[in-house]
Image (cartoon, rainbow, N blue to C red):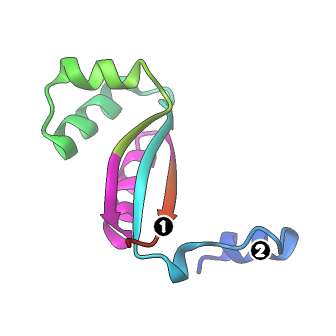
Amino acid sequence: MTWMQEFWNKIFPHHQDQTPDCDSADVILRATGNNLAHLSHVLCTMTGLPPSEISYYISRIPVVIFIGLPKANAIEIANAIQATGATVELRYYNKV
């Protein structure tokens, strides 16, 4: 757990991190940030989709980019997307 997660858990104890007991996650793009070209390039590289389809998805934010990834992969992808300045949400759950 990072120092920021510990900090928020102290301030909002009822809003604990959900990651320890979950095994998969969805990656949801919430906002593009200022560098749209870099975000588009990163998403094209990650998804393998052409730029026209990426532009379509970006125009419909919030949009689910990946569904049902293993937790570690989802976190890695979210970090890469956030490095472009975009805002990403991870939705955690257990596979049945």
For residue 86, say whether it is visible: no
Is residue 87 in the magenta section? Answer: yes
71 to 36, vertically: above or below: below
Tell me the SS state at disc 2. Answer: helix
| Residue placed under numbered mark 2 in the picture | 9
Q: Residue at x 26, y 26 (%)?
A: 54
Which of the two discs, 1 and 2, sits closer to the camera? 1
For residue 7, say whether it is visible: yes
Under mark 2, the amino acid is: Asn
Q: Quarter of the image containing the N terminus?
A: bottom right
Q: Residues within 10 Å of mark 1 (few under 14, many from 20)?
A: some
* Residue 35 vs residue 47, the one in the foreground: 47
Q: Residue at x 24, y 33 (%)?
A: 41
72 to 48, vertically: above or below: below
Report how far apart the C-alphas of labels 1 and 2 lie in the structure. 20 Å
Q: Residue at x 31, y 66 (%)?
A: 73
Question: Magenta segment, which residues?
Answer: 66-88
**First along the sequence among labels 1 and 2:** 2
Q: Quarter of the image containing the C terminus?
A: bottom left
Q: Along the horizontal axis of the image, is 21 left or right of 17?
A: left
* Residue 44 vs residue 34, the one in the foreground: 44
Under mark 1, the amino acid is: Tyr
